[in-house]
C-alpha cells in the first residue's frame, strides 16, 4: 500500500472535516472528542508520521506557509491542500453548528484570513478524485 497522508488546511467553517471524512481514510481532527488534550493529539500525529503505510487526512488551520510546512513535516505529509470558502460562508456554517465556542470560532475565521499567506503555492482542494489524478499533475512524491 502506498503511504498517503494529506494535510488539509483552511479557516474554521471551510468544510475541512466534511471533506476529510469523505476521503475514506483515517481522519485526525483535533475537534474530535477522542482527543482530550492537545498533547494527546500531537502524540498521535507523531506516531502517524512514522507509519510507513499510513492512509490519513490531518486537519489543521495552517493559515501561513510556515505553519503548513511545520505540520507537513511533522506528519510527513504526501500532499497538502487548502480548503477555503468566503468568510461569510464559513461564518454561516459556524453559526449553524450551534456550538458553545461559536464566538471564539467566528473570531478565528477573521484571524485566519488576516494572517493567511500562500507563499508556498499550496494547492486548493477540488475533489478527492482530482487530488490524486496524476494526469493533472497534482500527485506529489
Image (cartoon, grey):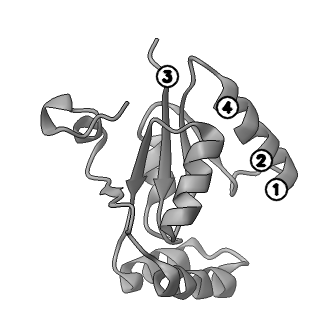
C-alpha gap between disc 1 and disc 2: 6 Å
Q: What secondary structure is found at the residue carrying circle 3? A: loop
Q: What secondary structure is found at the residue carrying circle 2? A: helix
Depth order, front residue of 112/128:
112
C-alpha gap between disc 1 and disc 3: 25 Å
Judge from the rendering whether residue 82 lies leftward or rightward of residue 17; answer left or right: left
C-alpha gap between disc 1 and disc 4: 15 Å
Residue 34 visible in the picture: no
Label 2 crowding class (10 Å Cα cut-off): few <14, some 14-19, many 20+?
Answer: some
In the rendered view, tell whether residue 87 sits above or below residue 58: below
Q: Residue at x 36, y 58 (%)?
A: 122
Q: Position of residue 136 (x, y in %)?
A: 14, 38
Mark toward the start of the polypeptide (3 vs 2): 3
C-alpha gap between disc 4 and disc 3: 11 Å
Mark toward the start of the polypeptide (1 vs 4): 1
Q: Label for residue 42? A: 2
Mark 1 vs mark 3: give the one in front: 3
Q: Residue at x 21, y 32 (%)?
A: 133
Query: Could you tell me if the residues under marks 4 and 2 are in contact, i.e. CB atoms within 8 Å?
Result: no
Residue highlighted by disc 4 = 48
Query: Could you tell me if the residues under marks 1 and 3 are in contact, i.e. CB atoms within 8 Å?
Result: no
Q: What secondary structure is found at the residue carrying circle 1? A: helix
C-alpha gap between disc 3 and disc 2: 20 Å
Residue 64 visible in the picture: yes
Judge from the rendering whether residue 115 lies leftward or rightward of residue 29; answer left or right: left
Residue highlighted by disc 3 = 3
Q: What secondary structure is found at the residue carrying circle 4? A: helix
C-alpha gap between disc 4 and disc 2: 10 Å
Query: Could you tell me if the residues under marks 1 and 2 are in contact, i.e. CB atoms within 8 Å?
Result: yes
Depth order, front residue of 111/115:
115
Amino acid at each position: 500500500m502506498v503511504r498517503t497522508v494529506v494535510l488539509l488546511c483552511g479557516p474554521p467553517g471551510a468544510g475541512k472535516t466534511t471533506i476529510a471524512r469523505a476521503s475514506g481514510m483515517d481522519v485526525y481532527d483535533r475537534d474530535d472528542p477522542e482527543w482530550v488534550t492537545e498533547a494527546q493529539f500531537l502524540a498521535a500525529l507523531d506516531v502517524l508520521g512514522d507509519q510507513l503505510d499510513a492512509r490519513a487526512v490531518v486537519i489543521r488551520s495552517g493559515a501561513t506557509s510556515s505553519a503548513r510546512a511545520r505540520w507537513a513535516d511533522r506528519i510527513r505529509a504526501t500532499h497538502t491542500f487548502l480548503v477555503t470558502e468566503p468568510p461569510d460562508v464559513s461564518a454561516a456554517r459556524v453559526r449553524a453548528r450551534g456550538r458553545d465556542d461559536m464566538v471564539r470560532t467566528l473570531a478565528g475565521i477573521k484571524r485566519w484570513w488576516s494572517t493567511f499567506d500562500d507563499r508556498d503555492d499550496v494547492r486548493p482542494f477540488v475533489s478527492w478524485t482530482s487530488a490524486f489524478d496524476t494526469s493533472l499533475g497534482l500527485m506529489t512524491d
